[in-house]
Image (cartoon, helix red, strand yellow):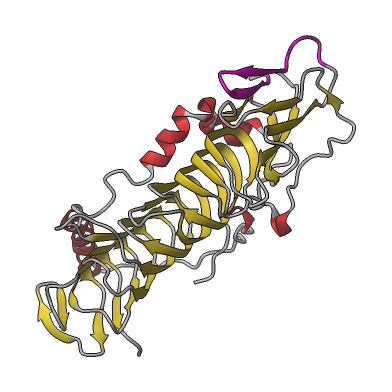
């Protein structure tokens, strides 16, 4: 299942459609019955499917980015609409070489305790934000590049330092366009380690590049919020990571936050590989997409949730040994409302806690693979579609609306697979 980015697809050609065949009365009745079977199937699996799918990402961006999400498409029309594609790693946009620099302070040096974030506001502003490290200073250094397409008539663009944050304010109305970019250098000692308590980036139409930050660097709380744009992830260590994009894409490698990592995208694709955890053995991972494809590899410590309203899922999971409560299980949840899911549990660490997994689709097929070392019970149930449940040492019995397979200690792990419309193919071990 190759990932194609929605914003990079060519429009489908307009072709003449053949006249549909006439339907008989019997076929019409069958169609109505099929509709209601599928419709009520949603309630059949509603306990496991999407109480908040898509809404959380949308609401999060409404609260942040200064209400920009609902305006993001129209406000930038005709001015580099594809600058968030970043094909080949480049940030496409208008030529700003002849734009006029803003007359304001653009160089800031702050202690790590005082550097809390960068906020950019405005209706016609765009640019890039790049994170780097520096051994030349013990300060967080922010260098801004802010310029406009025409001479300002007044104080249209302002740059201020307020409560630990640099704020760039640009007009919400009018024809003035602003290019606002930043290079943020975080100090590191000779061993490459340093602590930054927290940093928050909020911008309307930007590229954010974290890929140059070393794994040894630590940021306590890292938050990225974009109305439209692209995030190039990095393996910086964190306690918590929160990335929210209303329209755009997220790609790259990152570390699971010591406590949690959350990714929310309203429209766009996510292709990430989460390589281990920053520290500890109790982190949680939560990725939600309203519209878009999700592809990558992910660890499972305390819990991992992959949730898509409309799009395809292609995920490889590694169940790690986690520190949990006495009666606490490792939680795995994959949910796709409309789209296909392919999930491979590549490995289960020795000594890992019991697994409680739920794999669910409403309209879409599921292809699941668990390792040969798996022991436990797998329930596969669906209303419309074929169900295949097989594997090494797996004893399979027919059940209501599906099949149940058991291997080894049937109480050790529990996996539930549900779909309303679509095929289910579950394999334990090699084919």
Q: Residue furthest top?
A: 154
Instruction: Say which residue appears at 45% left-offset and 51% top-offset.
Output: 291
Residue found at x 68% / y 21%: 170
Taking the image as shown, residue 130 lies to the left or right of residue 64, namely: right
Residue 228 appears in which quarter of the rendering? top right
Q: Is residue 161 magenta?
A: yes
Viewer-nearest residue: 26 or 170:
170
Give the residues drawn in magenta, as a range: 152-170
Residue at 65% x, 44% y: name it: 188
| Residue 388 position in % (x across, y down) | 25, 82
Q: Is residue 240 above or below residue 12?
A: above
Observer-nearest residue: 51 or 146? 146
Tell me: residue 173, above or below residue 273. Answer: above
- Left or right of 361 in this view: 79: right
Q: Nearer the viewer, residue 235 or 323?
A: 323
Residue 180 visible? The answer is no
Choose top left, top right, bottom left or bottom right for residue 415.
bottom left
Quarter of the image for residue 426 reads: bottom left
Residue sitting at the far left: 400
Question: What quarter of the picture does the C terminus occupy?
Answer: bottom left
Residue 390 higher or lower than 328, as above or below: below
Task: Name the spot of residue 322 as percent of width and height, x first.
Answer: 30, 61
Extreme residue in the front direction: 190
Taking the magenta stretch, the answer to whether it contains residue 338 is no
The x and y percentages for residue 76 are 67, 34
């Amino acid at each position: 299942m190759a990932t194609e980015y929605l914003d990079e697809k060519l429009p489908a050609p307009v072709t003449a459609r053949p006249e549909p065949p006439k339907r008989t009365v019997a076929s019409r009745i069958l169609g109505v019955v099929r509709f209601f079977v599928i419709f009520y199937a949603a309630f059949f699996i509603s306990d496991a499917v999407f109480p908040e799918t898509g809404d959380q990402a949308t609401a999060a961006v409404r609260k942040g980015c200064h209400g920009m999400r609902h305006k993001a498409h129209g406000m930038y029309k005709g001015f580099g609409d594809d600058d968030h594609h970043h094909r080949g790693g480049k940030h496409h946009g208008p030529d700003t070489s002849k734009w006029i620099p803003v007359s304001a302070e653009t160089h800031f040096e702050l202690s790590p305790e005082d550097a809390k974030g960068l906020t950019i506001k405005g209706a016609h502003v765009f640019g890039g934000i790049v994170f780097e490290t520096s051994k030349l200073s013990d300060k967080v250094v922010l260098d801004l590049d802010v310029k406009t397409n025409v001479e300002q008539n007044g104080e249209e663009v302002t740059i201020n330092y307020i409560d630990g944050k640099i704020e760039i304010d640009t007009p919400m109305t009018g024809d003035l366009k602003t290019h606002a970019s930043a290079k943020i250098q975080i100090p590191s000692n000779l061993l490459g380690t340093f602590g930054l308590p927290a940093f928050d980036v909020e911008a309307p139409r930007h590229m954010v590049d974290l890929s140059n930050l070393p794994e040894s660097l630590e940021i306590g709380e890292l938050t990225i919020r974009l109305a439209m744009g692209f995030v190039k992830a990095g393996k910086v260590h964190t306690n918590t990571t929160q990335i929210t994009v209303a329209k755009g894409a997220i790609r790259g490698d990152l570390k699971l936050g010591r406590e949690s990592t959350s990714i929310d995208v309203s429209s766009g694709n996510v292709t990430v590989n989460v390589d281990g955890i920053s520290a500890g053995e109790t982190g949680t991972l939560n990725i939600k997409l309203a519209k878009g494809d999700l592809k990558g590899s992910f660890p499972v410590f305390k819990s991992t949730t992959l949730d898509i309203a409309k799009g395809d899922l292609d995920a490889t999971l590694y169940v790690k040994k986690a520190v949990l409560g006495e009666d606490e299980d490792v939680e795995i949840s994959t949910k796709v409302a409309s789209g296909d899911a392919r999930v491979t549990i590549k490995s289960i660490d020795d000594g890992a806690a019991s697994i409680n997994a739920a794999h669910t689709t409403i309209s879409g097929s599921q292809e699941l693979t668990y390792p040969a070392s798996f022991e436990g019970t797998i329930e596969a149930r669906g209303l419309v579609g074929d169900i295949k449940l097989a594997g090494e040492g797996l004893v399979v019995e027919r059940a209501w609306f599906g099949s149940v397979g058991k291997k080894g200690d049937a109480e050790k792990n529990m996996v539930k697979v549900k779909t309303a419309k679509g095929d289910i193919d579950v394999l334990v071990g090699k084919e």
